[in-house]
Image (cartoon, grey):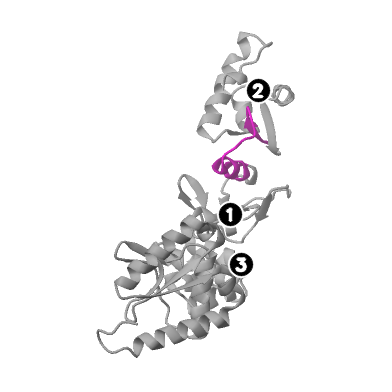
Amino acid sequence: MSDLRPKRCGQRNEPHAVGVARLAGRQEGVVKEAQLREVGLNRFAVRRWVQAGRLHRLFPGVYAVGHTALTTRGQLVAGLFYAGDGAALSHGTATHWWSLIRRPPDLIHISMRHHRKAVAGLVLHRPRHLERVFLHRIPVTPVARTLLDFAANASHNEVRKALANADYRNLLRLPQLGSTMGKGLPGSATLRRAVDAHLPQLAETNGPLEEEFMFVCERAGIPIPLPNHWVGDARVDALWPDERVVVELDSKSAHGSDAQRMVDHQRDMKLRDLGYTVRRYSWYQVFFTPDAVIADLTQTLAARRGSAPGTLR
């Protein structure tokens, strides 16, 4: 942080630089203008620091110190600083901060108590009642409220995935959602449908291909398999233990090379030696020709159920 030390202002400004550096170190590289005043920088000094590149304006009254290469956490802190006291991450941003979805939304969603002018990069909400908790020292809406807000703009299956993750990690009990959902509240209808169609196995899937395969099985009335289950020393994508059927799902990125295909074939041979029937379906088959997948899988499961005890097919 040595670039904070003014080159022309002499020793009398050094305490200001030290104070700003300490603030930035505690706050992910972000400071509020009110804090700059507290360490002795008036508005004219702040303007000079901005012109010199020592401060970078992120939002009105909020600055990055020294550079704008903020971490994700720093970006969230900046947004919360702008939203004011009592603000909290909410909606999709809170859902991601709780690790209930894989990717954060493009814009940062924050619920706040005070009115603030809209600014680029933030989506500001003013709910009637705002409750917040702290997760990793960042204020965020509680899980139940987070799911309700997320459901206002997410798809049915996206909400089901987030709900499954919350349930799997014991972040809430499903009955808790009843007091959160209210008639006419945005997201209530979608969240209620997600609760009614709760699919816990979604929490153990890895990525959209595995999730879509679960939905394909669900729509076809095929029993939901165990996702990412160990069979011997192999972790398989989907397993029907009673029928001893394994399904492996091949994405281009993970199974596109000759070397990876060789590994896959070796795994399949080991699984067959253990008495399992192995089926492989590609991304294209699952997403674009699911009827063919359903027909093949239904036939495979039926054949294994019809096998005599001890007979392998």
Q: Which residue is mark 2?
A: 41
Secondary structure at badge 2 equals loop
Residue at position x 49%, y 79% from top? 217
Residue at position x 62%, y 60% from top? 127
> Is residue 6 highlighted in magenta?
no
Evaluate whether residue 98 shows in this view. Answer: yes
Q: Is residue 105 left or right of residue 228?
A: right
Secondary structure at badge 3 equals loop
Residue 234, x across and y down, in percent: 34, 63
Residue 83, x across and y down, in percent: 63, 46
Front disc: 1 or 2: 1
Question: How far apart are labels 3 and 1 at the CA level?
Answer: 12 Å
Q: Which residue is mark 3?
A: 154
Q: What is the crowding at mark 1: few (fewer than 14 residues within 10 Å), some, or many (at least 20)?
A: some
Q: Earlier in the sequence, mark 2 or mark 3?
A: 2
**Foreground residue, 97 or 214?**
214
Residue at position x 50%, y 32% from top? 26
Q: Is residue 66 left or right of residue 147?
A: right
Answer above or below: position of 262 versus 47. below
Q: Amino acid at mark 3?
A: Ala
In this picture, which residue range is highlighted in magenta? 61-81
Q: What is the crowding at mark 2: few (fewer than 14 residues within 10 Å), some, or many (at least 20)?
A: many
Find residue 104 and name its label: 1
Q: Earlier in the sequence, mark 1 or mark 2?
A: 2
Residue 151, x across and y down, in percent: 58, 68
**Foreground residue, 44 or 268?**
268
Q: Earlier in the sequence, mark 3 or mark 1?
A: 1
Residue that extends furthest to the top in the rendered view of this protein: 10
**Foreground residue, 284 or 265?**
265
Q: Amino acid at mark 2?
A: Leu
